[in-house]
Image (cartoon, rainbow, N blue to C red):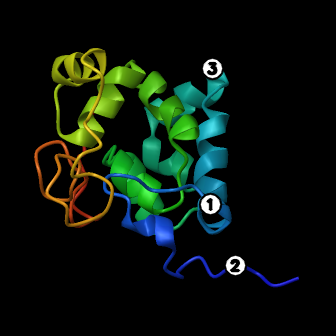
Amino acid sequence: MATEDPTADRDYDDIPGTTVFDMGRSREGYWLNQFCMSLMKADNRERFKADERAYLDEWAMSEAQKDAVVERDLNRCIALGGNIYFLAKIGATDGHSFQKMAGSMTGMSEYDYKAMMLGGGRSIEGNRHLGEDGDAQPGSRGGAPSDPAAGVGSR
């Protein structure tokens, strides 16, 4: 059985503001996502909140993944294999709603994000492929950062 190259370009890498959680990203983010799942237990949340770095060092995550968690850079976590449904456990540990987390990832306030979603979300026009000049394009207001290392970093 051939193994998937997690660094290979895929057709769906051209979707603005979207990272597809595929097999390669699943493998890359395994320990990051396992760490997130550990936060479902109250004692683990308390240990994490007491000394984040010490708790993270118990997990076989990359230094980049650990730094992204400490910085609460969810866009970077996703770029490093994190799955948003697992990463939501970090926001919940911090007392944040999923709506607040999603807003931070798009460069919007929680309230602006809510208004956008209640208004029907982003238009697909200009957002089907990178370079179309839509609002989900890298570098635009509400788009994913053009440099995944830049991130959002909201706590």
Residue 151, by quadrant, is bottom left
Q: How many marks?
A: 3
Q: Are marks 1 and 2 in contact (CB under 8 Å)?
A: yes
**Would you say 52 lies left or right of 33 here?**
left
Q: Which residue is mark 1?
A: 22
**Would you say 60 lies left or right of 76 here?**
right
Q: CA distance from mark 3 to mark 1?
A: 30 Å
Locate the N terminus by quadrant. bottom right
Q: CA distance from mark 1 to mark 2?
A: 10 Å
Residue nearest the viewer, comparing 95 with 150 = 150
**Disc 3 vs disc 1: which is toward the camera?**
1
Q: CA distance from mark 2 to mark 3?
A: 36 Å
Q: Position of residue 6 (x, y in %)?
A: 59, 76
Amino acid on which disc 2 is placed: Glu
Q: Which residue is mark 2?
A: 4
Residue that appears at 49% across and 32% down: 88
Amino acid on which disc 3 is placed: Ala
Q: Position of residue 66 (x, y in %)?
A: 45, 57
**Would you say 4 lies left or right of 46 here?**
right
Q: Dot 3 lies on which element?
A: helix
Q: Which residue is mark 3?
A: 42
User: Is 128 located above or below residue 24 in the figure?
Assistant: above
Amino acid on which disc 1 is placed: Asp
Residue that appears at 43% across and 61% down: 79
Q: Earlier in the sequence, mark 3 or mark 1?
A: 1
Q: Are marks 3 and 1 in contact (CB under 8 Å)?
A: no
Query: Going by the picture, which residue comes out furthest to the right?
Result: 1
